[in-house]
C-alpha cells in the first residue's frame, strides 16, 4: 500500500536532495520549526512534497456545495 511505504520515507531529506528550495527552506528543513509560523510553512513544504510525489491523489475531495444550499433556504423563510 502507498501509505505504508510513505511512512518509511524521510521527506525532509528527500526534499533537501532535490535542490528545490531556498536558503530559508533549507534551514527550516535541517533545523525544524522554532515558532508557529515556521511550523505552518513546514506543513506547506510537506504538502508540496506530497504533491510532487503524487501522494495527494487519494486525499478526500472537499465538499463545496453543502453550505450554499443552507444559506439559500434561510433567505426563503
Image (spheres, grey):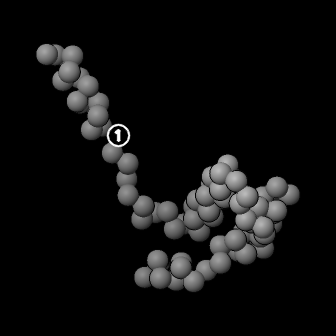
* Res. 23 in view: yes
View extreme (front): residue: 35
On the image, which quarter does residue 21 sit in?
bottom right
* Residue 50 image point, x, y percent: 57, 65
Total marks placed = 1
- Camera-side residue of 31 and 2: 31
* Res. 41 in view: no
Q: Residues within 10 Å of mark 1 (few under 14, many from 20)?
A: few
View extreme (right): residue: 23
Q: Is residue 73 left or right of residue 26?
A: left
Q: Residue at x 53, y 78 (%)?
A: 6
* Residue 24 image point, x, y percent: 82, 55
On the image, which quarter does residue 32 sit in?
bottom right
Q: Residue at x 46, y 77 (%)?
A: 3
Vertical placement of residue 47 versus 71, above or below: below
Q: Which residue is mark 1?
A: 64
View extreme (left): residue: 77
Q: Secondary structure at mark 1?
A: loop
* Residue 35 image point, x, y percent: 70, 53
Amino acid at each position: 500500500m502507498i501509505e505504508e511505504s510513505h511512512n518509511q520515507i524521510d521527506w525532509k531529506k528527500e526534499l533537501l536532495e532535490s535542490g528545490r528550495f531556498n536558503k530559508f527552506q533549507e534551514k527550516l528543513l535541517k533545523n525544524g520549526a522554532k515558532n508557529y509560523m515556521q511550523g505552518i510553512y513546514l506543513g506547506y513544504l510537506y504538502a508540496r512534497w506530497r504533491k510532487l510525489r503524487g501522494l495527494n491523489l487519494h486525499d478526500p475531495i472537499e465538499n463545496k456545495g453543502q453550505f450554499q444550499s443552507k444559506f439559500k433556504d434561510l433567505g426563503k423563510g
